[in-house]
Image: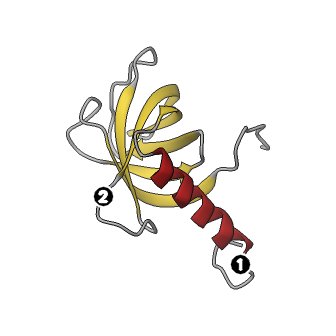
Amino acid sequence: MQENRQNTRYKEIGKAFSHELCALPGILDDISASGCKIHYAYPVVVDLESEYDLDVSPASHYGPNPIKLRCKPLWVNEKEGNTYIGFEIMYSPDAGKLSAFINQLENSSKDPFSDNN
């Protein structure tokens, strides 16, 4: 299924922390300049009308500090005990860090020797 997106989403694994959603981290599935998808390996209650602080630590992000995002959930799906959440990034306190990371992903996807092809 092809989706019309404002920005390219890149498959990226990592941890996603939102203490407002759950005390345990979720798993980052993909990310773009305007959104991301995460999942939890258990049921999580999500209010689609709320905004959440999300600290994202992608596996390929070099640096000790997570990328801090303010996100609004656009959709939630539960399947086989897992909770999948699609977020729109409303604001990024780490806008420069997010932009640099997205540029890094874009450049690595153009690399003919990259595993992302």
Secondary structure under badge 2?
loop
Disc 2 marks which amino acid?
Asn
Q: Position of residue 24 (x, y in %)?
A: 23, 44
Furthest toward the bottom, the residue is 113
Q: Residue at x 48, y 45 (%)?
A: 95
Q: Indicate the amino acid at tag 1.
A: Asp
Q: Which residue was labeled with disc 1?
A: 111
User: Which labelled disc corresponds to residue 65?
Assistant: 2
Instruction: Give left or right: position of 2 versus 31.
Output: right
Q: Residue at x 62, y 56 (%)?
A: 10
Circle 1 SS class: loop
Find residue 75 and report its image quarter. top right
Rendered position, 110 above or below 57: below
Residue 38 is situated, as x and y percent measured from the top left of the image, at: 45, 44
Image quarter (top left, top right, bottom left or bottom right) of the C terminus: bottom right
Q: Residue at x 40, y 23 (%)?
A: 51
Q: Name the spot of residue 16 as percent of width and height, x first.
A: 36, 48
| Residue found at x 55% / y 52% | 99
Direction from residue 31 to residue 108 in the image, left or right: right
